Image (cartoon, rainbow, N blue to C red):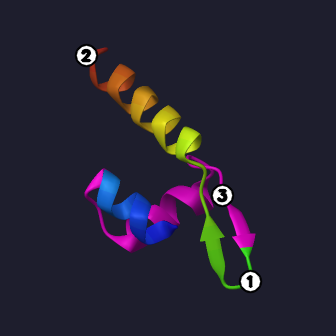
């Protein structure tokens, strides 16, 4: 869920919604809620780490 991802990334729920809306993290909408695969969160974290290391 968005709340779980926010806790993992240590960001607000709104930030996760923005990441989903911008397409940076894929999500499936179920009713009023979003479901996000753990593998997609891990991929986002990996990409973020790679970007940070390319200074």
**Residue nearest the observer in this picture, 54 or 12:** 12
Q: Are the residues at dot 3 and dot 2 in contact (C-beta closer than 8 Å)?
A: no
Residue position marked by numbered label 2 in the rendering: 55
Eye-nearest disc, 3 or 2: 3
Q: Residue at x 72, y 70 (%)?
A: 29
Q: Residue at x 47, y 36 (%)?
A: 42
For marks 2 and 1, the one nearer the N-term is: 1
Look at the picture and state if 23 lies above or below 28.
above
Where residue 3 appears, as percent x and y from the top left, is 41, 71
Q: Is residue 30 magenta?
A: no
Could you give the CA–CA distance between mark 3 and mark 2, rounded to whole angstroms? 29 Å
Q: Which residues are magenta?
A: 9-29
Residue position marked by numbered label 3 in the rendering: 27
Where residue 13 appears, as percent x and y from the top left, is 39, 72
Could you give the CA–CA distance between mark 1 and mark 3, rounded to whole angstroms? 12 Å
Q: Residue at x 58, y 59 (%)?
A: 20
Q: Residue at x 31, y 14 (%)?
A: 54
Q: Residues within 10 Å of mark 3 (few under 14, many from 20)?
A: many
Q: Which mark is residue 40?
A: none
- Which quadrant holds the C terminus? top left
Where residue 2 appears, as percent x and y from the top left, is 48, 68
Element at label 3: loop
Q: Which mark is residue 31?
A: 1
**Residue nearest the observer in this picture, 35 or 22:** 35
Q: Is residue 40 left or right of residue 42?
A: right
């Amino acid at each position: 869920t968005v709340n779980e991802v926010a806790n993992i990334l240590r960001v607000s729920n709104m930030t996760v919604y923005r990441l989903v809306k911008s397409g940076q993290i894929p999500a499936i909408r179920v009713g009023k809620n979003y479901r996000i695969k753990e593998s997609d969160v891990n991929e986002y974290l990996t990409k973020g780490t790679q970007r940070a290391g390319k200074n």
